[in-house]
Image (cartoon, rainbow, N blue to C red):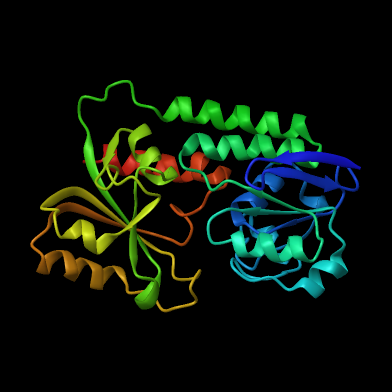
Amino acid sequence: MKKIYNEILGEYVEIVRWPVERIISMSSGLTEMLYMMRLEDLIVGTDAFSNKPPEAKKKPKVGSYMHVNIDIIRELKPDIVVTITGVQRSIVERLRNERIAVYPLPMPADVAGIISNTSILGYITGYIDNARKLSTELLRKIGELIPRDRSRTRSVLAVLDFGPRGGLWSPGSASHISDAIHLVGGICATEKEPVSYVETKTILEKLESVDIVIYENASYITLEQPIGYRSFAEMLEKRGIKYHKLEVFHEETLAHTGPSFILDSMSKLKNIIESL
């Protein structure tokens, strides 16, 4: 048995078998980390949205981003269940009430938070060397992406579409998205908001122009039909907000908090910013 302290819970989490041999991941970002740490054979279950890499889709599903099936989890007999904070806090409480070992990791507030979670995942599973190799790769990539000349910046409005009920949201200062935009040479139009995410409509009321608009469909989380980038573009036009370029991203390009956000999404952001 291993007792590992969890800062979020403020107490130790008891892991009966360590290094672990059976893991359930309730976050697509953490699932991808485990794969890139070469621990995919230890994953016995994931949430329904874990689709990176594509092989993760084949793993047994134990619930969605905000719901879990306790019976399936018990059948899979995990040594540890890993989750992310935010809306998954209710999942953590339910698993703890069922006496299932669960270790919540923090929602990244910046790009460094993704690397930090890689390290945390390494020591709670007992595969520290695997985690350090991945962390080193991610740090090297960030170094390549940071521009030497920051004299010419572009403003970026990023928008996540959670559907008619979920609404449109943009990253505030406590988001890995706004931090990534800054790192690759841009200025996030909503980075002054001291929150993780802010409703986009409140920003549009005081926004006059922006260089680049990036729209991403995130409605898979709320299981709704998206508002759509065309409707959002019409919204900008009605408000008289000017922009030079509108980019449409696929699901979980910006919202994703796994290693590919650094390896792929940030490269895409940099190319868009430098294209103007």
Residue nearest the observer in this picture, 176 or 215: 176
Residue nearest the observer in this picture, 213 or 177: 177
Q: Is residue 246 above or below residue 98?
A: above
Residue nearest the observer in this picture, 268 or 126: 126
* Furthest-front residue in this view: 10
Q: Going by the image, does 110 lie left or right of 43? A: left
Residue nearest the observer in this picture, 136 or 17: 17
Q: Is residue 148 above or below residue 181?
A: above
| Quadrant in which residue 39 is drawn | top right
* Picture residue at 72% right of the left edge, 69% below the top: 61
**Dividing the image into 4 quarters, which one contains the C terminus?**
top left
In the image, residue 249 lies at what x, y percent? 39, 58
Q: Is residue 56 above or below residue 136?
A: below
In the image, residue 23 lies at what x, y percent? 79, 53
In the image, residue 41 lies at what x, y percent? 82, 51
* Picture residue at 46% right of the left edge, 54% below the top: 255
Q: Going by the image, does 225 lie left or right of 71? A: left
